[in-house]
Image (tube, rainbow, N blue to C red):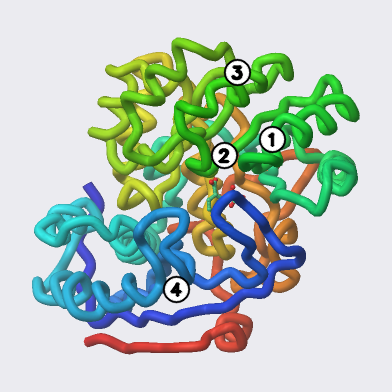
Amino acid sequence: MLAAVRLEGVELRVVHLPLVTPFTTSFGTQTVREAIVVRARTSDGDGWGEIVTQEAPVYSSEYTRGAWDVAERFLVPALLSPAAVAPGEVASILHPFLGHRMVKAGLELAVLDAALRTAGQSLASHLGATNTRIPSGVSVGIQRDPSALVDAVAAYLDAGYVRIKIKIEPGRDLGDTAAVRAAFPGIPLQVDANSAYTLDDIDTLAGLDRFGLLMVEQPLGDDDLVDHAALARRISTPICLDESITSEKAARDALTLGAAAVINVKAGRVGGYLEALRIHDLCRAAGTPVWCGGMLETGIGRAANAALAALPGFTLPGDVSASDRFYARDIVIDPIALDDGHVRVPTGPGIGADVDEAALEEVTVARLDLR
Ligand code: OSB
Ligand code: MG
């Protein structure tokens, strides 16, 4: 186990990073990525984490102002009260406070990063990564019309992305998917509904079966495990769960029920990289493929995601895109880049990315120093 760090303070910053292009999903359009950057100040140096909430509670119930409040009033004080805290203890210290997994994940990552930097070990090696580079997929938002979508997909394929995921919603599903499939018959393709359907939409969802998709991601509600299991019996496209998988326990339940053939692992959604590792281990033992999802992370979370995605059970390309897919200027030095459709797994200590403090300062819109 990693040694404890002496936590002297926690700095929180709300950041606003403009997106290079608007990102539309079934839950809305984003033009700016709002998130919270966490700096854990320890006696041996700083560690960095990222809380992947958005401005509004539309992907999940978490949102930035709520995250800020619970961090300030409950979670950070709980972490600051012991003399020292080991990364492996963060989840149990925060366990009495229900929910708020994205906040817990960001705080745990900052402590983990600090401890790993002190120990001189990379996050990838700490988690048990076996790959030095990982295939990179891209998540493409809903466009003005199917032909604009085909153009957008073409540009990402030109850039080298090895797998395309398109967002769908009622009215923008079979037509969009058909257009992309017709333009690019052989590409690895999947769709993501972000919970926009119900079992009443079975005919539409079954209509996806003719496109040879890798999977359909989260067609139904986040608490619809039983309905997902029913849907899985009626369609041949493999079902991948994202929003529903909030913990290792939720992943176990989904597998037991037959609600998921594939799992999208996002550290923020499940309360941290250590819980994400447990989901990886569960799925690997069960023979269920997992892949690393994304939440439009800044260079901090993106570096950590690349480390996670390098574990042996991540057998499908994840949404670990290059930084420039979303941002003109990231907040780390030497952000994740695409090289022949792959991204390099960071090897430096901790998350393996160093924060560009000048860039961070420019995108900071609120700041709080807790001691
Ligand atoms: O459902 O996977 C999702 C972004 C924000 C919230 C939810 C999702 C997404 C993405 C983009 O699809 C993933 C990424 O590249 O970061
Ligand atoms: Mg998703």
What residue sits right under mark 3 in the picture? 206
Is residue 129 visible in the rendered image? The answer is no
Q: Do the residues under discs 1 and 3 have CB atoms within 8 angstroms?
A: no
Q: How far apart are marks 1 and 3 (CA)?
A: 11 Å
Q: How far apart are marks 2 and 1 (CA)?
A: 9 Å
Q: How crowded is mark 3: few (under 14 residues within 10 Å), some or many (20 or more)?
A: some
For residue 68, above or below residue 101: below
Q: Do the residues under discs 1 and 4 have CB atoms within 8 angstroms?
A: no
What residue sits right under mark 2 in the picture? 193
Give the secondary structure at mark 3.
Answer: helix
Q: Do the residues under discs 2 and 1 have CB atoms within 8 angstroms?
A: yes
Give the secondary structure at mark 1.
Answer: loop
Report the disc number at residue 173: 1
Res 100 quadrant in image:
bottom left
**Amino acid type at image mark 1:** Asp
For residue 280, above or below residue 348: above
Give the secondary structure at mark 2.
Answer: loop
Is residue 358 visible in the rendered image? The answer is yes
Identified at 30% across, 56% down, the residue is 101
**Amino acid type at image mark 2:** Ala
Report the disc number at residue 37: 4
Q: Which of marks 1 and 4 is in front?
A: 1
